[in-house]
Image: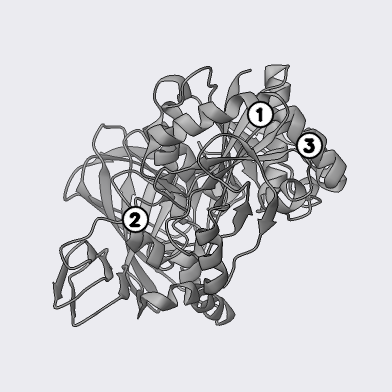
């Protein structure tokens, strides 16, 4: 039976703010190496033996171009053509897996195995993971719904647990109980008993078995998923679920909807250096450290510091006398806290949202399908941005009603459309775009184009855009 990886890429990663934002979440970040967590997941899938089809990737519609771009960079060999399924909003993992199961069945015309993987986990030993998948395949092909339980290395209060048989020395075993995140003393007893595993949120089951159990235990989700897929639109390499239909899917996880209720739940123990990277403290645990236990990233100078995570994204960060602390600097925010308070980042994000702060959704640099823009400076009536246009990319043909723009090229060669004119600008050359003028920037070359843009007007919001043509299907949108 062929295996279809299903990569769930819809999370928001708020516990890693300020690096992770709603519109640039943690699965798209390179946190423990040169590749993003999503790209690491794709690479992990490529190591699986046997018949493995191209992945199905389920992501939030707002992240579609970022995810597509990272998948193009990561693609190789047998996973070179992943299909992207777009959720208009997150409904948790049970509906996402149901949509993927339906898509896989319809495309294959027969039952297939689904390997369901979150896109934001770390696995230090991909070979051990591939071996666990191989071990689980016969049970999944026989109708078992298999989860992968991580052999605990310490009492952990941030994970749910699975109770298995008295021994967890290997092999496929029945799941006796799912338990919620425990307090420390309970977690200590779980680990000492030898019968409990961390609940990883990774699964292997056949599409038929999952849909059958979903129909039994959560028939409303199963029916809503069918309606959402039937109303979906395929365009530009994306399969976009229709908003109203998908919103009828109840928000529920695979665990709650199916795994905790089915009589066919099984588990394979996994020792592969796994982490869900669910907090800055857990990121410290999986990061490379110096002789003092510090993980230092970027332009950091640390004096007399121990067991701390310090990350500098845009400037020099200096720290002294810290023990067990988290310091994270980005272009527009700084986070400082004791490691033991890492779970409180969620409270910070909630407070920022209550105050209407935009920093929960966007960083200073905003990514678009053509590249990105970085807001360098601004005040009443003006704003300065640096535009980065990727090779071969083109911005939409657009105009603004309330602002004019002045562009100067600082690297590469840009092709400019200004009403009926089309002309090229090289380094040091500039042009002016009056208010109400149709305009577009294109990068026809193989080098990145960078442009300094000065906007002047009485309103500088991103919603002052009227699009006439757009390669990326964004007519009528402001993203």
Q: Looking at the image, tell me whether mark 3 or mark 1 is earlier in sequence order.
A: 1
**Residue ID for mark 3:** 231
> Is residue 235 found left or right of 124 in the rendered image?
right
Identify the secondary structure beneath mark 2: helix
- Compared to 296, does 172 lie above or below? above
**Residue ID for mark 1:** 140
Give the number of the mark in front: 3 or 1: 1
Instruction: State the separation of the CA atoms marked 3 and 1.
Output: 30 Å
**Residue ID for mark 2:** 286
Along the line of sight, the residue nearer the viewer: 371 or 207: 207
Q: Give the x, y percent position of residue 90.
A: 65, 53
- Compared to 174, does 366 lie above or below? below
Along the line of sight, the residue nearer the viewer: 267 or 441: 267
* Residue depicted at x 17% and y 70%: 316
Q: Give the x, y percent position of residue 448.
A: 26, 41
Q: Give the x, y percent position of residue 179.
A: 66, 60
The reply to whether dot 3 and dot 2 touch (C-beta < 8 Å) is: no
Q: Looking at the image, tell me whether mark 3 or mark 2 is earlier in sequence order.
A: 3
Give the number of the mark in front: 2 or 1: 1
* Number of other residues with Cα within 10 Å of mark 1, as a class: few under 14, some 14 to 19, many 20 or more: many
Residue 22 in view (yes/no): no
Instruction: State the separation of the CA atoms marked 2 and 1.
Output: 30 Å
> Is residue 109 found left or right of 388 in the rendered image?
right
Q: Looking at the image, tell me whether mark 2 or mark 1 is earlier in sequence order.
A: 1
* Number of other residues with Cα within 10 Å of mark 3, as a class: few under 14, some 14 to 19, many 20 or more: some
Image quadrant where one finds the N terminus: top right
Identify the secondary structure beneath mark 1: helix
């Amino acid at each position: 039976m062929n295996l279809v990886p299903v990569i769930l890429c819809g999370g928001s990663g708020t516990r890693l703010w300020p690096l992770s934002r709603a519109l640039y979440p943690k699965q798209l970040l390179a946190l423990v190496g040169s590749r993003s967590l999503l790209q690491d997941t794709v690479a992990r899938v490529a190591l699986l033996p046997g018949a493995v089809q191209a992945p199905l990737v389920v992501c939030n519609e707002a992240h579609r171009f970022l995810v597509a771009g990272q998948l193009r960079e990561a693609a190789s060999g047998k996973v070179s053509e992943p299909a992207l399924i777009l959720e208009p909003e997150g409904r948790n993992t049970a509906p996402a897996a149901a949509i993927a199961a339906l898509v896989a069945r319809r495309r294959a015309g027969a039952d297939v195995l689904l390997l369901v993987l979150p896109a934001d986990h770390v696995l230090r030993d991909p070979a051990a993971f591939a071996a666990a998948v191989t071990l689980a395949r016969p049970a999944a092909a026989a109708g078992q719904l298999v989860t992968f339980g991580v052999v605990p290395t310490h009492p952990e209060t941030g994970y749910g647990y699975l109770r298995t048989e008295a021994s967890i020395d290997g092999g496929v075993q029945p799941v006796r109980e799912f338990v919620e995140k425990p307090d420390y003393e309970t977690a200590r007893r779980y680990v000492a008993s030898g019968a409990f595993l961390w609940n990883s949120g990774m699964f292997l089951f056949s599409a038929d078995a999952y849909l059958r159990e979903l129909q039994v235990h959560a028939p409303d989700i199963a029916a809503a998923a069918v309606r959402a897929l039937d109303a979906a639109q395929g365009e530009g390499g994306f399969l976009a679920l229709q908003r109203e239909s998908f919103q009828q899917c109840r928000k529920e996880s695979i665990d709650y909807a199916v795994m905790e209720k089915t009589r066919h739940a099984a588990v394979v123990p996994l020792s592969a250096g796994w982490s869900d990277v669910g907090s800055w403290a857990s990121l410290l645990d999986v990061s490379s450290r110096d002789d003092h236990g510090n993980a230092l990233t970027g332009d950091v100078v640390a004096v007399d510091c121990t067991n701390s995570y310090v990350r500098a994204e845009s400037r020099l960060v200096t720290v002294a006398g810290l023990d067990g602390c988290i310091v994270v600097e980005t272009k527009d925010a700084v986070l400082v806290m004791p490691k033991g308070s890492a779970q409180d980042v969620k409270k910070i994000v909630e407070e920022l949202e209550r105050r209407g702060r935009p920093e929960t959704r966007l960083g200073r640099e905003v990514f678009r399908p053509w590249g990105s823009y970085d807001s360098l400076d601004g005040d009443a009536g003006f704003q300065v941005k640096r535009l980065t246009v990727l090779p071969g990319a083109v911005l939409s043909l657009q105009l603004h009603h309330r602002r004019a723009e002045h562009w100067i090229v600082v690297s590469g060669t840009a092709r400019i459309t200004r009403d009926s004119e089309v002309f090229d600008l090289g380094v040091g050359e500039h042009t002016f775009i009056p208010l109400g003028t149709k305009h577009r920037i294109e990068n026809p070359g193989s080098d990145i184009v960078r442009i300094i843009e000065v906007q002047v007007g009485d309103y500088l919001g991103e919603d002052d855009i009227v699009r006439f043509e757009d390669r990326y299907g964004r007519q009528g949108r402001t993203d």
